[in-house]
Amino acid sequence: MAEIKLAEKFIAYIDILGYSALTKAAEAGTDFSFSDLEALLKVLGSEDDRKHHQKYGPTTCPMAPRNREDLDFQVAQVWDSVVVSAEISPGGVVNIVSHCFGVCIRLLASGVMCRGYVTRGMIYHDGQRIFGSGHVDTVARERQVTFFKQDADERGTPFIEIDPEVVGYISAQPDKCVKEMFGRMTLTHEGVTAIFPIKLLSHPLVIGGIGRREFNPKEERQSNEGVREELKNLKAKLMNFVNKSDLSATKKANHYIRAIDRQLNICDRTDEMIDALCQPFPSHR
């Protein structure tokens, strides 16, 4: 057995919310089965993720500075949760955030929420063996997530929050890819940063210009409408999995419903911009 030596690493802990309700739904054998539940658990990550990094190296920002080619990337699924760790390096931090982003967006696509925390600390992580205060602290802080809270005392909102120290580490890095990818995968709201995949569900207008295709109102409207339908489908899936009689579960779902509604408002504003761009410019005499 390998000697247990702690090392400082980036650490993420992610937990599927509503797992007990999902288990009961699978037992009831209605529209949800244990095969569906097993598929959700696979989303969290497995030994295959470690092997992938070991064989191919970083998948996000592959040219970012790193200490080891495999980033000392470790994944351990523990029942309805997962622990992920990676070395302290720009490559390590962006790939652990990327893993969290992938878990979050794939679970959401099935109408399931998760909660987690990303920090740095001391840990021994080798396969399923996990020791160290870093792991203990990350699990404890997962329960205290406040991102997008609706009132001052609320704790445990359904997001993967990122420790300010980790955010500061990324901000101090000169690597452009690391900063850009981190910005795409996260959102900072009232000073708190978290994984936020819903922001990707938007349609950037193509106005034209050098090296860009011409503005096509029909194509822009179709693309924007496609985004709108994705958001509506996501909203329906989330509400389908929520037990309406469970006030806590409903409150958690409302956080994402609010976020989705914000994106739907952006779709409406995008339509207005398309209409405005179609108007002829006033002539001047």
Image: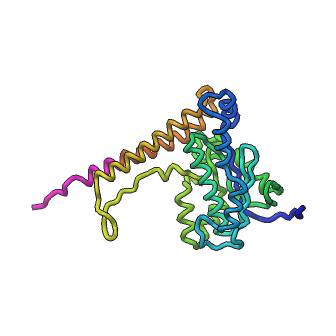
Q: Quadrant of the C terminus?
A: bottom left
Q: Among all residues in the image, which is located at the extreme left?
A: 285
Seen in the picture, residue 73 relative to 264 is either above or below; the reply is below
The total of numbered circles placed on residues is 0
Horizontally, residue 221 falls left or right of residue 120, namely: left
Q: Which residue shows up at 41% across the image and 44% down it?
A: 228
Q: Nearer the viewer, residue 62 or 261?
A: 62
Q: Residue 195 in the image: state x and y as whole percent.
A: 59, 53
Tell me which corner region of the image, top left, top right, bottom left or bottom right, holds residue 55.
bottom right
Q: Residue 260 in the image: state x and y as whole percent.
A: 49, 43
Q: Which residue shows up at 51% across the image and 39% down it?
A: 257
Segment tinted magenta in the rendering: 270-285
Horizontally, residue 191 falls left or right of residue 133, namely: left
Q: Residue 255 in the image: state x and y as whole percent.
A: 56, 40
For the question of whether residue 192 can be seen, the reply is no
Horizontally, residue 89 falls left or right of residue 277, namely: right
For the question of whether residue 132 can be seen, the reply is yes
Q: Which residue shows up at 67% across the image and 32% down it?
A: 26
Q: Among all residues in the image, which is located at the extreme front?
A: 35
Horizontally, residue 285 falls left or right of residue 85, namely: left
Tell me which corner region of the image, top left, top right, bottom left or bottom right, holds residue 94.
bottom right
> Would residue 47 be counted in the magenta stretch?
no
Tell me which corner region of the image, top left, top right, bottom left or bottom right, holds residue 174.
bottom right
